């Protein structure tokens, strides 16, 4: 089962940034890139593992789609930049936690397993709060038309996810 846990860091990390985004997370992620992510320094990107570079590339692709769909203007760029920086950091943070969990999972007892997952859940909640705050700053800078567009997109995503979860509950 290591391959399942190998993919979980990417999927879980991306969930943070696409939970608010427009596209669903696929089973695969973007290919590793050798270029720096927007906002990252060359030294930061060079120090990244291939998996981290792939996560950032995928997050950046999702962010680019979101940016285009919202129509971010020059006046909104600084707030957008703050949101993207938090998105990338969250993805890398959660990925690192899942990678660490995957490395030690085979030696964990049930209590350690639960504690590990609780730590990931707590970090996920903290990161989501940080992302929400960054998004609130961005949202406040958007025009009413942009807000209406993103409200509808987020609502549709939330409705689809709720429907999916309710369907799973009915089949349980």
Image: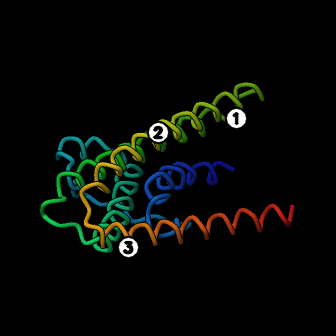
- Looking at the image, residue 52 sits to the left or right of residue 108; the answer is left
Depth order, front residue of 134/37: 134
Q: Quadrant of residue 119?
A: top right
Residue 149 - label: 3
Q: Which residue is mark 2?
A: 96
Q: Earlier in the sequence, mark 2 or mark 3?
A: 2
Image quadrant in which you'd find residue 35 = bottom left
In the rendered structure, which disc, 1 or 2, sits on the residue that comes first in sequence?
2
In the rendering, at what x and y percent does residue 10 appear? Answer: 49, 53
Residue depicted at x 48% and y 42%: 94
Circle 2 residues within 10 Å: few <14, some 14–19, many ≥20: some
Q: Name the outermost residue toward the right.
A: 172
Residue placed at 62% from the left, 65% from the top?
Answer: 161
Q: Residue at x 64, y 53 (%)?
A: 4
Q: Residue lying at the far front in this picture: please name it.
A: 144
Mark 1 highlights which residue? Answer: 106
Name the image quarter holding the C terminus: bottom right
Which secondary structure lies at badge 2?
A: helix
Bin the neighbour count of mark 3 within 10 Å (Cα to Cα): few under 14, some 14-19, many 20 and up.
some
Mark 2 and 3 residues: CB-CB less than 8 Å, in contact? no
**SS assignment at label 1:** helix
Q: Residues within 10 Å of mark 1 (few under 14, many from 20)?
A: few
Task: Give above or below for 39 relative to 127.
Answer: below
- Foreground mark, 3 or 1, reads 3
Q: Earlier in the sequence, mark 3 or mark 1?
A: 1
Residue 49, image x, y percentages:
36, 46
Q: How is the image coloured?
A: rainbow
Q: Position of residue 102 (x, y in %)?
A: 60, 40
């Amino acid at each position: 089962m290591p391959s399942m846990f190998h993919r979980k860091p990417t999927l879980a990390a991306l969930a943070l940034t696409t939970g608010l985004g427009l596209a669903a997370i696929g089973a695969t992620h973007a290919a590793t890139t050798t270029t720096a992510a927007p906002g990252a320094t060359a030294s930061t990107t060079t120090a990244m593992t291939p998996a981290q570079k792939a996560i950032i590339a995928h997050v950046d692709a999702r962010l680019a789609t979101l940016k285009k769909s919202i129509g971010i203007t020059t006046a909104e760029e600084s707030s957008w930049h703050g949101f993207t920086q938090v998105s990338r950091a969250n993805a890398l943070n959660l990925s690192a936690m899942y990678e660490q969990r995957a490395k030690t999972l085979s030696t964990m007892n049930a209590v350690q397993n639960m504690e590990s997952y609780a730590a990931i859940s707590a970090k996920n909640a903290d990161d989501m709060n940080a992302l929400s705050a960054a998004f609130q700053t961005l949202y406040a800078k958007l025009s009413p038309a942009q807000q209406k567009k993103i409200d509808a997109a987020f609502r549709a995503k939330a409705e689809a996810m709720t429907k999916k979860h309710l369907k799973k509950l009915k089949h349980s």
